[in-house]
């Protein structure tokens, strides 16, 4: 009997591209073909999580007796032919299969956290168990003490994947030794970076792996209650996590007397309201307690005095999803990936001007060049790469000249950026580094909780200077002032938000000072992005008087007769760029 499997991507990207109707179409066509009812062929159709290369959605796997074919850009109209020719006839539809760029996208990836995303059905505990799930917790509860469990994680070299990079095993070991009648473990799923979707994809694609990591962590530190603090803006992740908790409880992996070992552990979900500062552990704790999400001074650290004053371990989604793999395969296996001080793999969301945007997982120590030009496929439209913003709004911009830099905690920190939770935004020659830095500073300034003066006032003053610069009102001394303010804020802020908020500005001044000077001294934006520093003009040669620019202008600044040279009244021009976008003959120039 042939074993047929159809997997349809139903992460957020897959659903947005039409995954629901594609899944329904496969079920309908297979029923019409009566494949599932035949003796010769039995087919299973199920949803899976994010496959990584979201630009190719809807992605569909067809597996016949272990031989897999992956199809890209599938819609319901294509399903009948795949069923008829491939599932029934045994011949793949070659023109719809993924191309070389899909293979290149995965060639240098090493998937640990994402290993089963795209394989298991995220709403089926049986699918997770079939893939080896919950074997790690069985191993821990049957053959390892809490001390041995924490030690194994410590030996692996796993560092927190939420941004700070603190050694996970050390955190567990410390909390385990603190005497207390109650302890807590919290999964931080409050992913607030613009353009970041690593934790969301892990929760949507394989929530049981995160739960299993939490259970192991709770056993290691002696906790009996855990919280998953997750953004309310992630409804699919919350839904699948809720299903996973219910299934795990029904099967005895959560609740009282887990696997009849006497160990008890329960998990609760706490929805966050979207405050970026609640990614900071003490602000997150305050939010769970029902208080306003604001950080508190440390020490004492949460491992000593955390949730409701009790010892608490906080790990992010990616950190916890690594735990079952380390327990099953051993600390030495995990530490064989990466560098001496940055072990294992890291998940990144690769976005921006790169061809292959999506979710990737790579070994620590890989270079930025390999990520951007090999996995990412290079820059779109043949343009030149200028930089990469690493670490989200708290990170820094690294110029293309430094793309041979190793991606690890220490190297990125020395370069003025951070790994952070894993955001990576690729910028090309059309991006203004001053405007980009202002955007991220504006985000962190808005998200400041306001508790400490350096962050509340300091970032506001920095933003005011940046706004003057992009408007053409910058003056000599602004850069020195920005650097002085930025360094003071980094050294005196209460929490990580303030300590890292100046990074985008400081790193761009460090590597792209010439762009700042052009804005300040020449009153020009070299990338023609900052609209107050751009002048639109109609060139004599290409203009044929078609009138497209005239019709597009909202300010009636364009004048001219049909088939004659048009002109722009600079006193009325609002620099919106509508004329530039409307002209098909490239007669409108940015100066």
Image: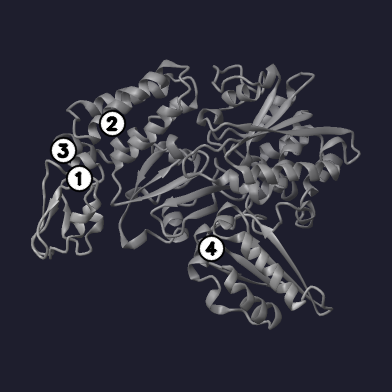
In front here: 11 or 324? Answer: 11
In front here: 288 or 588? Answer: 588
Q: Distance between the residues labelled 2 and 1?
A: 27 Å
**Residue 492 visible, this angle:** yes
| Residue 46 x/y as whole percent | 71, 61
Q: How far apart are marks 4 and 3 (CA)?
A: 45 Å
Q: Are marks 2 and 4 in contact (CB under 8 Å)?
A: no
Among the two numbered marks 3 and 1 on one chain, the one whose residue lies closer to the N terminus: 3
Look at mark 1 in the image and give the residue it sits on: 555
Corner quadrant of residue 145: top right
Among the two numbered marks 2 and 4 on one chain, the one whose residue lies closer to the N terminus: 4
Look at mark 4 in the image and give the residue it sits on: 107
| Residue 169 x/y as whole percent | 67, 34
Look at mark 3 in the image and give the residue it sits on: 523
Q: In this view, does 144 lie to the left or right of 24?
A: right
Q: What element carries label 4?
A: helix
Among the two numbered marks 3 and 2 on one chain, the one whose residue lies closer to the N terminus: 2
Look at mark 2 in the image and give the residue it sits on: 466
Q: In this view, does 302 lie to the left or right of 581?
A: right
Q: Is mark 1 on a helix, strand or loop?
A: loop
| Residue 581 x/y as whole percent | 26, 56
């Amino acid at each position: 009997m042939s074993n047929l499997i159809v997997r349809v991507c139903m992460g957020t990207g897959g659903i947005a591209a039409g995954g629901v109707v594609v899944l329904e179409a496969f079920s309908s066509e297979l029923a019409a073909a009566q494949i599932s009812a035949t003796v010769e062929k039995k087919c299973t159709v199920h949803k899976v999580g994010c496959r990584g290369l979201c630009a190719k959605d809807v992605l569909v796997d067809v597996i016949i007796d272990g031989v897999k074919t992956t199809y890209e850009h599938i819609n319901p109209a294509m399903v009948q032919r795949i069923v008829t020719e491939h599932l029934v006839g045994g011949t793949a539809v070659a023109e719809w299969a993924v191309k070389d760029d899909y293979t290149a996208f995965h060639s240098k990836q090493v998937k640990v956290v994402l290993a089963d995303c795209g394989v298991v059905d995220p709403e089926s505990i049986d699918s997770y168990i079939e893939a080896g799930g919950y074997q790690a917790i069985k191993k821990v509860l049957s053959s390892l003490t809490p001390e041995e469990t924490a030690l194994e994680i410590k030996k692996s070299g796993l560092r927190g994947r939420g941004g700070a990079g603190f050694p996970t095993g050390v955190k567990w070991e410390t909390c385990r030794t603190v005497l207390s009648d109650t302890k807590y473990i919290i999964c931080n799923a409050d992913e607030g970076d613009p353009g970041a979707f690593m934790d969301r994809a892990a929760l949507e694609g394989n929530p049981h792996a995160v739960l299993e990591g939490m259970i192991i962590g709770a056993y290691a530190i002696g906790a009996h209650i855990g919280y998953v603090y997750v953004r309310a803006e992630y409804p699919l992740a919350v839904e699948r996590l809720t299903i996973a908790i219910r299934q795990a409880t029904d099967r005895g992996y959560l609740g009282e007397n887990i696997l009849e070992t006497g160990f008890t552990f329960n998990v609760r979900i706490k929805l966050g309201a979207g405050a970026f500062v609640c990614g900071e552990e003490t602000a997150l704790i305050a939010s769970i307690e029902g208080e306003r999400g604001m950080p508190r001074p440390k020490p004492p650290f949460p491992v000593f005095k955390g949730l409701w004053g009790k010892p608490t371990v906080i790990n992010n989604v990616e950190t916890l999803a690594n735990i079952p793999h380390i327990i099953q395969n051993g600390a030495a296996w995990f530490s064989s990936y990466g560098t001496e001080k940055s072990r294992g793999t890291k998940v990144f969301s690769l976005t921006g001007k790169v061809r292959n945007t999506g979710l990737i997982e790579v070994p620590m120590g890989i270079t930025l060049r390999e990520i951007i030009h090999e996995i990412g496929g290079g820059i779109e439209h043949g343009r030149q790469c200028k930089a990469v913003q690493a670490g989200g709004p708290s990170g820094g911009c690294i110029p293309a000249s430094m793309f041979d830099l190793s991606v690890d905690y220490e190297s990125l920190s020395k370069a003025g950026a951070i790994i952070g939770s894993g955001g990576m935004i690729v910028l090309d020659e059309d991006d203004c580094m001053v405007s980009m830095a202002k955007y991220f500073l504006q985000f962190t300034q808005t998200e400041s909780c306001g508790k400490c003066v350096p962050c509340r006032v300091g970032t506001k003053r920095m933003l005011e200077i940046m706004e003057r610069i992009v408007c053409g009102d910058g003056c000599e001394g602004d850069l020195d002032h920005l650097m002085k303010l930025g360094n003071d804020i980094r050294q005196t802020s209460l929490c990580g938000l303030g300590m890292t908020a100046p990074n985008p500005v400081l790193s761009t001044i460090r590597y792209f000072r010439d762009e700042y000077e052009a804005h300040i001294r020449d009153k020009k934006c070299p990338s023609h992005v900052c609209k107050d520093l751009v002048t639109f003009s109609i060139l004599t040669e290409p203009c044929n008087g078609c009138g497209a620019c005239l019709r597009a202008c909202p300010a009636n600044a364009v004048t001219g007769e049909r088939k004659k040279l048009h002109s722009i009244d600079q006193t009325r021009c609002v620099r919106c760029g509508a004329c530039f976008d409307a002209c098909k003959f490239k007669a409108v120039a940015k100066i």
